[in-house]
Image (spheres, helix red, strand yellow):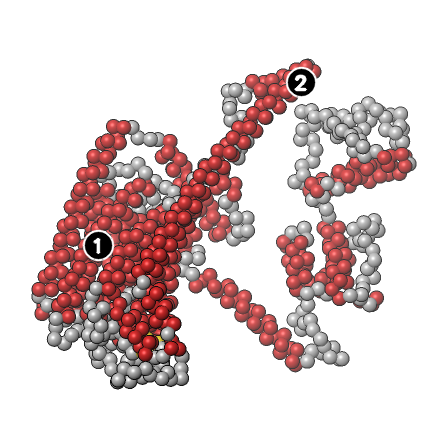
Amino acid sequence: MAFALEVPETLEDWGQEPSPYDEEEVHHSFHQLIQEQSQWAGASGPEEAGLELQEIGRGTSTPGAPGGDQQVTPGPGDTPGYSAATLRILASMPSRTIGRSRGAIISQYYNRTVRLRRRASGQLPRGARPSLRARDLELDPTARDEEEKRSLLIRELRGLTGVQQDQMLRGMPLSLAEKRCLREESRIPRGTPRGKVDGRGIWSCCSQLKYGCVLAMHSLWLWLLGQLPALKPWHYALKRIGGQFGSSVLSYFLFLKTLLAFNALLLLPLLAFIVGVGAAFPPKELPHPAPTFTGLELLTGGGYFTGTVMYYGYYSNATLNEPCVSPLDGSECTPEAGGLPYSMPLAYLFTIGAAFFITCITLVYSMSRSFGESYRVDSNSAVHAITIFCSWDYKVTQKWASRLQQDNLRTQLKELLAEWQMRQDPQRLCARVRWGALLACVWLLCLGITLACALAVYTFSEFIIQRPAAYSQEVALLALPLVVSLVNLLAPYLFRVLASLERHQSPMLEVLVAVCRNLIFKMIILGILCYHWLGRRVRILQGQVRGQCWEDFVGQELYRFVVMDFVFILVDSLFGELVLRLVSEKKMKRQRKPEFDIARNVLELIYGQTLTWLGVLFSPLLPAVQILKLLLLFYIKKTSLMANCQAPRRPWLAARMSTIFATLLCFPAFLGAAIFLCYVVWQVRPSSRCGPFQGLDTMYEAGKVWVLRLERAGPRLSWLPWLYRYLLENTFIIFLLSALLLAVIYLNIQVVKGQREVICLLKEQISNEGDDKIFLINKIHSVYDKKEQSRGGPAGSSRQAQASSTPEDPEAGRPFLHR
């Protein structure tokens, strides 16, 4: 039967009802009303049973009630009266059942535990059941007190398993302290664990030993899980850096973390297929005798490290587990018992190629993924409301964690507001022209500094080649890395001084310009060094009578460059930033510390990673050195940042910086290193007395030699030469793989572009729906105002006054979240 419930709303009735947050008051008030109305309905008889959700109107008599001729007229502070059935329905509403008593909750879950035990273990004997097993304690008016209910619940909880106890306690609407007390009381004492006992009620030795071992293993597992976050150097430090210095400085440490993952991915196959196999099967005759360790090798990379697995010259061109020994007459040999032959030259070449291919795929994937994420983060117009209302983690209970989260939210809001303010203040045309001319002049000065530094490095390298006698000692080998590292340290400071004249309006644009200048400088220096190693050094070392292993020399040079780069970064962090802070505070009497130079530090990481990729062919363990360097660099930079630097004066949102860093790492750095190594493999003649490719014209010919050996080994291994010829030597397959890779990159770009268009359409649709809501709200207000005006009520004037203020304040009817 359809019915309508009209509850009159007056301004006097607002705020008179008890608040739903005062749960105990709500529960007791409704409980009292239910009891009064139940007694009233019982006295009146069954006539009241059919009245549900019917309001007892003002000035009307209540049928069946004592004194039915009296009229129930609520006063100014009274609430309207309802029937008993109506009050029962209202009291059973979800919003009104919040304030149930603790005893009712405990008794309810006691009944659930009884049913759970019966389902789990079948029908229990009568002696195992409690005395009140069949009584509903929640609905029984003569129930026992709360302590008895609690003891019954604890008794039943002890009969459940640990998982069932946790699930039951987790579902109880009780406070954490009450749940903790119930869990502690329901635990069985250590002297009486669950299990089977003998007839005398005593545990056997085997059961005690088993239970002790299980507890020990469980405690050990929990301890290991607790120590797992300590293995990550970025577990707590990244949150602290992001909270105090913002996302711009945090992007540097996230990029360092990414480089750690790339080097670990590169090192694993090298350890498995090259270094591990070379250490397990060492060559019979080493090319150089092992000298004594003096400690200077940690800087130079030579001496004791020369004849070890660290460098190319240690590995031989032998074939492990060879299927047969080729006869002298060239006839087909009989395969011996054994597995597949393991060619060390082929393993050396293919492992490095596969590692570079995996790194390339990972770089492309991470670049496309970071591009999509940065666009989604930076393109949300309602990010301010999301940051305010949806960013707090309510699971945080510790004081230091809550302070850290407050710092993070405050820094995010500063960056968002700064980004919004920059968009609201565009420059004028004259200011843009003047700023463009100044920018061109600064760029010319920076390019001049770059060319001067490149000329100085080239001149010094030629000087070393022309006078080899003066640099025959190992200490003198550090001269070229020392000069290059010094130039790499001083040039970015000059760029930073010139950049201060530009006065960029956007801090992000300032960082991007600095990154481009430093990148051009680093790439030119690396190009000169590659020419120095392959164009000059290789010819000199190959022309010597002793036939020195030039691959070892190039590997040692790259090791020295990596080590000297780390030494200069260490000096710059511990002394350069410290000196700037002391000068700023003591001499210039400023309270502000210097800011963290993001562009220079990021380019130092890219420079060091490029050196690692260049030297992995000549030193397979160079990625391990880079991993150690990055780990130490993380702690050094974090300490220097906390002590000597401050947050940026102009906060800015670095949502796209991870995409930019990944792009710079992929195309200039990785692509240049890949071209360098391909040139070495296909064009440069390897050493004739050392290494896995000795005696060959190029490293690429190792595959042809391996195929000829397999063809002479018999038909059992004929499928391997077929794979090599049709999959590796065939240029069509190489072009097909390249085309597939380009297609994947293109599809990723198109997918991201489609996501961008969909996001724009959804944003427009949300905006239109917000306008529709405002339109409907205004229409409803106008209809209601006309209705009130027709009635002539006092609310009409207030509604009319509110409606009259709507045109002046267009945001008055807009929902807050949409606003």
Q: Is residue 93 above or below residue 217?
A: above
Q: Position of residue 671 (x, y in %)?
A: 29, 55
Above or below 296: residue 186: above
Residue 683 is situated, as x and y percent measured from the top left of the image, at 21, 64
Question: Gap in Å between the C-alphas at discs 1 and 2?
Answer: 79 Å
Q: Residue at x 53, y 28 (%)?
A: 771
Residue in the picture at 22% in, 38% down: 439
Q: Is residue 227 left or right of residue 284?
A: right
- Rendered-image quadrant of the N terminus: top right
Q: Earlier in the sequence, mark 1 or mark 2?
A: 1
Q: Residue at x 75, y 40 (%)?
A: 91
Image quadrant of residue 39?
Answer: top right
Residue neighbourhood size for the residue with mark 1, other residues' Cα within 10 Å, grouped as few (<14), some (14–19), many (≥20): many
Judging by the rendered image, the residue that carries numbered circle 1 is 488
Q: Disc 2 designates what residue?
A: 787
Q: Secondary structure at mark 1?
A: helix
Q: Quadrant of residue 678?
A: bottom left
Q: Secondary structure at mark 2?
A: helix
The crowding category of the residue bearing disc 2, from other C-alpha atoms within 10 Å (few below 14, some 14 to 19, many at least 20), is: few
- Quarter of the view holding residue 431: top left
472 and 109: which one is in front?
472
76 or 396: nearer the viewer: 396
- Residue 280 locus on image (x, y percent): 35, 79
Does the rendering let one see residue 18?
yes
* Residue found 89% across the figure and 38% down from its top: 42
Residue type (three-letter) at the residue carrying disc 1:
Asn
Q: Can you see residue 558?
A: no
* Residue 623: mark: none
Q: Amino acid at mark 2?
A: Lys
Image height check: is 627 above or below 714?
A: above
Figure label count: 2
